Image: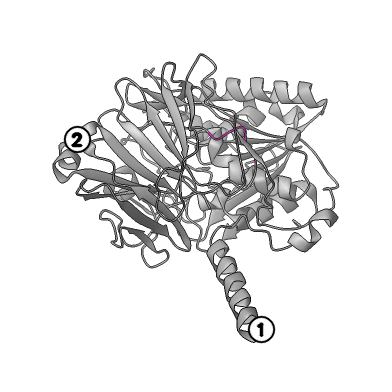
Amino acid sequence: MRGFLRMIAGLLAGAALGLAGCQFVSTATDRRETVPPPPMQTPIIFVHGNGDTAALWHTTIWRFESNGYPPDRLQAVDFAYPQARNDDATPMVGRSDTGDQMRQLAAFVARVRQSTGADKVALVANSRGANTVRNFIRNGGGAAVVSHAVLAGGVNHGVYISQTFNPGSEFNGAGPFMSALNAPYPDGGEVTPGVRWMTLRSDNFDKYAQPDGRFVGQPAMQTGITFDGPALRGADNVALPGADHRETAFGPAAFARMYQFITGTPAFRTSIEPTDPVVLEGKVTGFLNGAPTNLPLVGAKVTVYRVAADTGARMRVAPHQKTIGPDGLWGPLTVHQGATLEFVIEADGYPVTHIYRSPFPRSSSVIHLRPAPPGSLTADDTAAGSAVVITRPRGYFGVGRDTFLIDGRVPPGVTDGVPGVSVARLRMPAAPLRSVATRFNDERITVMNWPASERRIVYAEFHY
């Protein structure tokens, strides 16, 4: 009997260890029925950054839901052309200017206010999204309809200050857009009165708040920006030690700060509380003129396989398949929480993209997919046999801070110092077809080495 009990205890301990790296496991599951609803349930709109999508917010939305926030009051905007122009005043195919972004946000805010009946909304933004939020509140009538604004990893004084390098960019602190946005109010503040403001920044790990310009391709340039560049006079300015540019918005510590700021009470948990079953939905989008868009990739085909977590091998379950129509949607798909999935995207002009993702603890309607860009599969990939990529949509890989491996090896191209790379690739033989283990810290995803000769590229996406 003692041996049996020891065996059971060992199995339970092993299960707990295996789940520990997946932050959706609640630290308060024995109290899940006692989660008090937040005293304030203002609709919250999440605003993504440059080149990004609403999908980056789905783990943050899950954390709000896990603290009792009503799902219908948690919305994320998708900008049609999310990448900024080189010069804000000069049109570029597939890119947007600051006015485009502001008008789309204003329309989205109006729809959310109408659907919820709320007088005001809270806005939470990352990176370029902070520019859009500030512009909307200052110049687009947002001051009358916004109660709280959280700017996480905002480039609030620019990424650089220059009269010669991309002088018209919205990211130039000396450019027309940023100069006007930061013009002080009569009280000396840089934030619009009548709205509560908070900035979340890194202590020194934000790649876009650095004294030199290496992250904008100008390593010899002194940017004129300091580590506290995202801070604004008149806001509640908070530094998150060790966080990188994206973690200032999407990490658990960032969530805890924004939750308390908006609701006035501490979060009950920062982990994600699982539910079952899980219903998944989202859009498939692509690229235009080399820039990412959030428009439907009509005609693309999506196949979703359930795979074994330890091998990446497809299970004997009928796959979900859909050809993308004008609405862009690839679902809905219902699975058990924690299911391990492989998404395969096929579209004219794109590599066949195999995406293996972290398991899904809760339902979401913003599980957006985007195939690898045209031209991203190279001759070197084909010559080697297979290309396996690891990626962190909500953060970067930090040398010494993080463990990141493909097939037991550290992939090339990740530099020391400030974390600034979120994608890393390792080339390997394609034959025989086999399981390839990938790892980011305590989380593991197993993929297959699909052959590049068949125009296939493999991604392991780490989401926690």
Q: Residue furthest front?
A: 1
- Residue 104: x, y in percent? 59, 21
- Residue 5: x, y in percent? 65, 80
The Cα atoms of the two marked residues, 2 and 1, are separated by 56 Å
Secondary structure at badge 1 equals loop
**Corner quadrant of residue 237:** bottom right
- Residue 23: x, y in percent? 59, 57
How many other residues sit within 10 Å of disc 1, few (<14), some (14-19) or many (≥20)?
A: few
**Does the magenta-highlighted stretch encompass residue 78?**
no
Between 460 and 61, the one nearer to me in the picture: 460
Foreground tag (2 vs 1): 1
Tell me: residue 287, above or below residue 41: above
Between 364 and 415, the one nearer to me in the picture: 364
Instruction: Read off the magenta span.
Output: 363-367
Residue corresponding to mark 2: 453
Left or right, 64 with reference to 399: right
**Corner quadrant of residue 184:** top right
Between 358 and 66, the one nearer to me in the picture: 358
Left or right, 229 with reference to 334: left
Residue in the image at 26% along x and 47% along y = 433
Q: Is residue 11 visible?
A: yes
- N-terminal of the pair, mark 2 or mark 1, is 1
- Residue 198: x, y in percent? 66, 48
Question: For the residue marked with disc 1, what is the amino acid?
Answer: Met
Q: Main secondary structure of the magenta part?
A: loop
- Which quarter of the image is occupied by the N terminus? bottom right
Question: For the residue marked with disc 2, what is the amino acid?
Answer: Ser
Residue corresponding to mark 1: 1
Residue in the image at 70% along x and 42% along y = 187
Tell me: residue 408, above or below residue 127: below
How many other residues sit within 10 Å of disc 2, few (<14), some (14-19) or many (≥20)?
A: some
**Does the magenta-highlighted stretch encompass residue 364?**
yes
